[in-house]
Amino acid sequence: MRRNSTQARPSSSLPQRLFTVGLIVVFLVIASLAALFVFDQVRQFIAASEVLPDFTLDSEQPQQISYEPGKPLPRWEGTERINILAMGIDQRLGEQGPWRTDTMVVMTIDPVMMQAGMLSIPRDLWVPIPGYGEGRINTAHYDGEIYNYPGGGPALAAETVQYNLGIPIHHYVRINFPAFERMIDLIGGIDIYVPDDIVDPTYPDMAYGYDPLYIPAGMQHLDGEMALKYARTRHSGGGDFDRAKRQQQVILAVFQQVTRLGLLPELASQAPALWQELQDSVMTDLTLDEIIALARLASEIDSDNIRYGVIDENYTQFWTTPNGQEVLIPLRDQMRELRDYIFTSEAPTPDPGPEQESDQEPQWMAEAATVEVLNGTMTPGLASSTTELLVQNGVQVDYTGNAELSNYTESLIISYSGKARTAEYIARLLDLPPTAIVHGADASASQYDISVILGANYTPPEE
């Protein structure tokens, strides 16, 4: 059975930190903003420095920022929930566009209830595009650019998401991938746990050919180019659904890298130069003040009040259009439940699948998954106490023991046979974030369906 160690990682308030940097990473200024605005000691560093001149992210609409060294950082003054559409475009070197969106994520913050959320949208979702008939949701940006829609591609993409989800989109951020690579390299690369070998012989290059991709399983240090490939490859059977989960891994890894203590002052000193360099790579209708205020607001939200979602196979069905396009048809009732869970304050946790649960047993139980629980730390009895908790909540544990290594700092739930609902149920029982679930495509790597490896970030239940 394959076991892999993880490198040292921060462990406190992980979901809260993930969302905070998630906001920043999609603005493609994570290195400067995470270093400058998230932590108190860095705020003090700013107050004593002349690091923020008068500049703005969108050079076509120059605005005066209000922050001055020594003054409190801007706070978000609004009381209404705010939703932001983040888009990544497949812009190749030298191309002038228009482009389709390769990545779409809606982020939300309720400043009164102090709740937040993040919803990933697959690019093959087949939806009405207002004024342009039906198509893949990733073509809305392209249509808006080529047909000179008011506000361009970002505006039509935002209207399309708003129309199909039934929520307002207040702001947008659009980034390109060369800038993403540049930012990853500036922070020295990232560390990623790859659950299984990635072999993608048809990964696209920048000239519409192929650039075969191979990333071995285990803990890997990725530069900007490889981090982008890891986030974009569709090598696994899960396609875009697994891609969304890998992108969350990348966000987490970026956070861990930029918040290393020794890196913060170095990144802070580069802030003005980074902004200037990224002006042609990032487009948004948010001002720098608003970005800072949103990042600060997000950092104050309790981790229990952050919700995550992916419009995956539980909320869609595969379909081939009359002209041969393979697309995803939204299951509107199920998708509406997921939307309400992410974007409203009182919505219950949605049923993640289109099938109805029977009165006799929940759907995770029907998977009949085999489970092992392994202690990946030096804490004695951790696996045994966790096994007791799982068994008390109906999970059958087939094996309890120690992992081959005892230096795991992050807990993992490795699903080898696609029994996702059991993995998600275990994550909820153990109070682990969705990013703890990784998918092992090679079922022969384990004799069990699910391996739970407990790391230093796991707090056992109180007696």
Image (cartoon, rainbow, N blue to C red):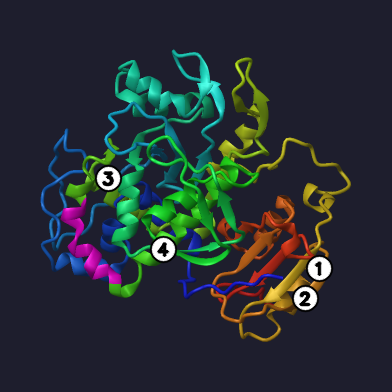
In screen coordinates, is 233 left or right of 94?
right
Q: Residues within 10 Å of mark 2 (few under 14, many from 20)?
A: some
Residue type highlighted by circle 4:
Ile
Please name whichever residue, 406 or 82, is drawn nearer the observer in this view of the structure. Answer: 406
Of marks 4 and 3, the one in the foreground:
4
Instruction: Estimate the spatial distance between the alpha carbons at disc 4 and disc 3, rounded to whole Å.
Output: 27 Å
Give yes or no for contact between labels 4 and 3 (Cβ–Cβ under 8 Å).
Answer: no
Label annotation for residue 400: 2
- Residue visible at 47% across and 72% down? 9
As drawn, 354 above or below 256: above
Instruction: Estimate the spatial distance between the alpha carbons at disc 2 and disc 3, rounded to whole Å.
Output: 49 Å
Give yes or no for contact between labels 2 and 1 (Cβ–Cβ under 8 Å).
Answer: yes
Q: What residue is pinned by disc 1?
A: 397
Q: What residue is pinned by disc 4?
A: 190
Q: Residues within 10 Å of mark 1 (few under 14, many from 20)?
A: some
Q: Check disc 2 and report its element: helix, strand or loop.
A: strand
- Residue visible at 40% across and 56% down? 20
